[in-house]
Amino acid sequence: MAGKLKITLVKSTIGAIPKHRKTVEALGLRKPNRSVEQADNAAIRGMLQQVRHLVKVEEI
């Protein structure tokens, strides 16, 4: 887990519960179809597990 992850928001957070909205925002995602790069660590993996229905993840 030393690489990087490319995280893309593929679904809007409009209908999501507030906790998931805050998690997506904490990942650095603001609008659908935007991507960010994050370090591959346990904290980020846990956040992604929580919102896996809203995002697409690629290892880079």
Image (cartoon, helix red, strand yellow):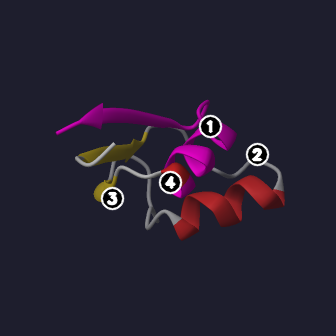
Q: Earlier in the sequence, mark 1 or mark 3?
A: 3
Residue nearer the viewer, 59 or 41 = 41
**Rendering coords of residue 4 (x, y %):** 24, 49
**Rendering coords of residue 51 (x, y %):** 63, 41
Q: Give the residues drawn in magenta, as a range.
A: 43-60
Residue located beneath label 1 in the image: 49
User: Is the Cβ of the residue at disc 3 closer than 8 Å to that at disc 4?
Assistant: yes
Gap between marks 1 and 3 measured at Cα: 14 Å
Q: Amino acid at mark 3?
A: Gln
Can you tell which of label 2 and label 1 is closer to the viewer?
Answer: 1
Q: Earlier in the sequence, mark 3 or mark 4?
A: 3
Q: Residue at x 64, y 51 (%)?
A: 13
Q: Amino acid at mark 2?
A: Gly
- Local packing at callout 3 (Cα closer than 10 Å; few below 14, some 14-19, many 20+) is some
Instruction: Report helix, strand or loop for mark 1.
Output: helix
Gap between marks 2 and 3 measured at Cα: 25 Å
On screen, residue 35 versus residue 19, left or right, reads left
Q: Amino acid at mark 1?
A: Gln
Q: Residue furthest front?
A: 2
Residue located beneath label 3 in the image: 38
Q: Which mark is residue 15?
A: 2
Q: Earlier in the sequence, mark 1 or mark 4?
A: 4
Q: Amino acid at mark 4?
A: Ile
**Rendering coords of residue 54 (x, y %):** 57, 37
Q: Residue at x 33, y 58 (%)?
A: 38
Gap between marks 2 and 1 measured at Cα: 18 Å
Residue located beneath label 4 in the image: 44
